[in-house]
């Protein structure tokens, strides 16, 4: 990112800026010119294009000198008073990387293979704490996961504060021996999600709120995907986020997997199209100095075929099943991203179960340890030229298939399989030890470091790693970005059923229209922009003694927003009521669900999902009485409201948030509503815009909906859709008016 000439910096640092209209990676020239060392300079842009069209990039420096070589300037990152090849922005990236690797010590190389959480402190605290100092100065780390919620305001972490934090960490890195810049990554953080969960995704805060990933897929418009990528890239880069742990291109073929809401669809070809367009927009194609965010997509080769519907974060969910023979289909989105130039790919924790593909029988170890998957398939056959970033915690807690191995053996297995950086790990000594012991060769270490450094060079971070923090509050959540996101929310809404119910009749002073609502903001429903509906709310609150008001006579419509969540935080592997309860037996092992978790990895089910014995419960009738499922409002309240509405002649509209492809079973009575609208994370405003006809529904289902739960349990985990007799609504279904 080019910095403004008046960019504000703390007085304790020195900034050297050289401005230009464009960036170039041209090589050669200037070696015979005299060299001048500068600590600060301000030179107008028109002095920096030579007769051959070589253009000087902007340089941002706080502590290292600037070398002036003829009319061009360079950062003297190792402070040796001369221009080293890795400091010369006119040379090709490969040349610069190779020379830097030669200069690096084993300690410095080891630090490159680590990435862990480093989030901003709240405003008012010192920006740089003990963890940052240790990670940079002792562990030599250059990659971090940023998990802070960013919200404009005087407390917490504002965009300006976040940008100042990433700048301060960059300054700390600049002051190290070789001045290698860092990269901050984040999980997805631009979606309307009332239940964001750290380690999975982040709350949107002040960032633009788009529908969840299935909602983007439901729009079926790649122009929207590209707009999404470009918009969020501008927001992320404004606070110094230049890398992502996103997006998930697992194909959602098993509805029981609770991470379906982070995927796009059950259709591998649609996912491939989205992957291609996101890499071309958010990343801007192969990483280059104009790239806003270098993407790490996940989870290779696809976590969607979760055996039994269980997630691989958990000991009872280690396996991926491709029993339908569709492994190749799950590779399609990753191949599309690779062809578009994606920077990095993250394998999942899963162990492939009885998988043979193209004549190769895959070892039954987690994919990050699986050489057949990472080196042979991903890097060699599929042609991935970037690096491989493990998922968090593969060393120690989730080393599936290698649980009995030492930490050193697990590290070596991952690196030798082709994994280049270990997430959730921060000990350079552990890397040094596996190299010194011969478990990992110096050549393999250098190959990993080379792959990682290419991203930092290609992004232009070696020239300028800093952002203009003064602009961050104006860029994050910019009104036009919020408007784009709201429009995408509207477009994602999918009309499943409409028995002459929608759009809602428009009220007039002479002919009022009365609404009864649950789980919606009555102020928005009654807004004059919609004509001024008269609204009665049926919400249970402390103010009304947790009593639901009945649907009054004269009501025209009952509008209910239905949301499903899990309440599984009480799970413990050794708890006689949950994980160690003999009433709940894992059919795979014949033991209790927590029997294979002596370390308590699964405790609290921190990453989400139902109790394992309730993972097949996706029908509303079953979920309404389950221990770990919650329906809001409760199914009895929904049913009572529908009966009351029918009694007074009101039409019923249900908007169901399909975090997973739930079953609208017959016994629940939900299918008798006059209209059913599927949403994938939208605001009340977006919903009302469609219900009232201000905008027509245009979404298409990103996956099929089964009409019975047994169809889900018996379907191959890697196969999309169901037999016609088991299908309520097929993939692609969506009405309009």
Image (cartoon, rainbow, N blue to C red):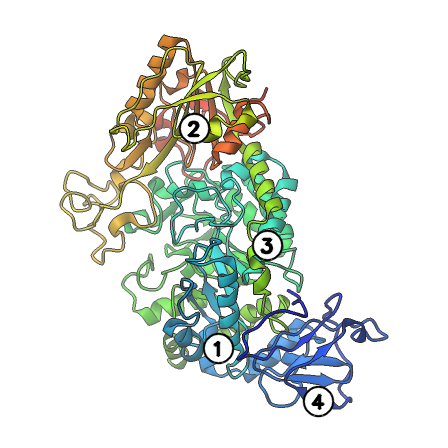
Kind of element beneath mark 4: strand
For disc 2, the marked residue is 522
| Mark 2, secondary structure of its residue | helix
**Closest to the observer: 390 or 126?**
126
Q: Residues within 10 Å of mark 1 (few under 14, many from 20)?
A: many
Q: Position of residue 559 (x, y in %)?
A: 43, 22
Category of crowding for the residue at label 4, using alpha-carbon neighbours closer than 10 angstroms: few (below 14), some (14–19), many (at least 20): some
| Comes first in the chain, label 4 or label 1 | 4
Q: Earlier in the sequence, mark 1 or mark 3?
A: 1
Question: Looking at the rendering, in which quadrant would you find the N terminus?
Answer: bottom right
Q: Is label 1 in a helix, a strand or a loop? A: helix
* Residue situated in front as seen by the camera: 204 or 494: 204
Question: First in sequence: mark 1 or mark 2?
Answer: 1
Tell which residue pokes out farthest to the right in this image. Answer: 51
Q: Where does label 1 land, which residue?
A: 109
The residue that mark 3 highlights is: 475
Residue 93 locus on image (x, y percent): 65, 72
Picture quarter with the C terminus: top right
Distance between the Cα atoms at labels 1 and 2?
58 Å
* In this picture, residue 698 sits left or right of residue 651: right
Tag 3–tag 2 contact (CB < 8 Å): no
Tell me which corner region of the image, top left, top right, bottom left or bottom right, holds residue 669: top left
Q: Position of residue 65 (x, y in %)?
A: 62, 84
- Which label lies toward us, 4 or 1? 4
For image coordinates 29% across by 51% down, the residue present is 315
The residue indicated by pointer 4 is: 36
């Amino acid at each position: 990112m080019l910095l403004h000439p008046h960019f504000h910096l703390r007085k304790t640092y020195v900034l050297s800026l050289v401005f230009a209209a464009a960036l170039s990676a041209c090589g050669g020239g200037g070696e015979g010119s005299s060299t001048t060392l500068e600590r600060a300079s301000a030179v107008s842009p028109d002095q920096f294009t030579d007769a051959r069209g070589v253009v000087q990039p902007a340089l941002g420096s706080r502590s290292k000198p600037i070398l002036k070589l003829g009319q061009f300037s360079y950062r003297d990152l190792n402070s040796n008073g001369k221009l080293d090849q890795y400091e010369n922005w006119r040379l090709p990236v490969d040349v610069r990387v190779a020379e830097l690797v030669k200069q690096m010590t084993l300690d410095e190389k080891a630090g490159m293979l680590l990435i862990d959480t480093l989030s901003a402190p709240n405003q008012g605290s010192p920006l740089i704490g003990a963890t940052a100092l240790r990670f940079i100065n002792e562990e030599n780390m250059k990659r971090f996961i940023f998990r802070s919620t960013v919200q404009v305001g005087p407390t917490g972490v504002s965009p300006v504060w976040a940008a100042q934090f990433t700048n301060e960490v960059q300054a700390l890195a600049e002051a190290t021996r070789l001045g290698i810049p860092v990269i901050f990554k984040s999980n997805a953080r631009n979606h309307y999600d009332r239940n964001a969960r750290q380690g999975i995704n982040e709350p949107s805060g002040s960032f633009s709120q788009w529908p969840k990933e299935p909602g983007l897929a439901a729009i079926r418009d790649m122009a929207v995907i590209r707009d999404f990528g470009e918009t969020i890239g501008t927001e992320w880069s404004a606070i110094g986020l230049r890398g992502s742990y996103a997006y998930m291109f697992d194909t959602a073929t098993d509805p029981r997997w609770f991470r379906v809401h982070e995927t796009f669809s059950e259709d591998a070809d649609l996912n491939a199209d989205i992957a291609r367009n996101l890499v071309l927009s958010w990343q801007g194609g192969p990483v280059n100095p104009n790239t806003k965010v270098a993407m790490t997509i996940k989870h290779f080769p696809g976590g969607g075929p979760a055996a039994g519907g269980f997630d691989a974060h958990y000991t009872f969910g280690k396996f991926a099943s491709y029993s339908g023979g569709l492994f190749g289909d799950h590779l399609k989105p990753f191949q599309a991203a690779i062809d578009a130039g994606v920077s990095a790919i993250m394998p999942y924790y899963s162990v492939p179960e009885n998988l043979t593909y193209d004549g190769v029988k895959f070892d039954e170890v987690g994919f990050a340890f699986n050489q057949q998957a990472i080196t042979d398939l991903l890097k060699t056959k599929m042609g991935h030229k970037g690096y491989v970033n493990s998922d968090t915690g593969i060393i120690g807690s989730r080393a599936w298939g290698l649980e009995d191995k030492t930490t050193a053996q697990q590290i070596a297995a991952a690196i030798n399989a082709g994994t280049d950086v270990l997430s959730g790990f921060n000990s350079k000594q552990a890397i040094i030890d596996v190299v010194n012991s011969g478990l990992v060769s110096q050549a393999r270490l250098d190959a990993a470091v080379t792959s990682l450094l290419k991203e930092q060079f290609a992004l232009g971070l070696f020239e300028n790693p800093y952002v203009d923090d003064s602009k961050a509050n104006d860029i994050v959540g910019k009104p036009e970005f919020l408007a784009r996101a709201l429009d995408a929310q509207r477009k994602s809404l999918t009309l499943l059923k409409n028995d002459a119910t929608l759009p809602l009749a428009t009220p007039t002073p002479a002919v009022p229209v009365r609404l009864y609502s649950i789980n919606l903001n009555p102020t928005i429903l009654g807004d004059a922009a919609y004509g001024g509906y008269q609204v009665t709310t049926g919400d249970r609150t402390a103010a009304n003694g947790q009593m639901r008001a009945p649907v009054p006579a004269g009501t025209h419509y009952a509008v209910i927003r239905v949301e499903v969540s899990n309440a599984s935080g009480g799970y413990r592997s050794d708890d006689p009521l949950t994980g160690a309860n003999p009433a709940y037996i894992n059919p795979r092992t014949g033991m209790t669900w927590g029997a294979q978790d002596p370390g308590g990895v699964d405790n609290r089910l921190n990453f989400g999902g139902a109790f394992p014995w309730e993972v097949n419960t996706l029908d509303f009738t079953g979920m309404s009485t389950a221990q770990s499922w919650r329906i809001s409002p409760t199914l009895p309240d929904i049913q009572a409201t529908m009966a009351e509405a029918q009694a007074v002649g009101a039409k019923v509209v249900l908007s169901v948030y399909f975090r997973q492809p739930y079953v609208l079973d017959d016994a629940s009575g939900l299918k008798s509503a006059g209209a059913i609208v599927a949403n994938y994370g939208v605001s009340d405003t977006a919903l009302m815009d469609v219900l009232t006809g201000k905008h027509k529904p245009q979404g298409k289902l990103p996956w099929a909906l089964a009409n019975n739960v047994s169809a889900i349990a018996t379907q191959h985990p890697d196969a999309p859709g169901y037999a016609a007799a088991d299908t309520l609504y097929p993939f692609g279904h969506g009405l309009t008016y």
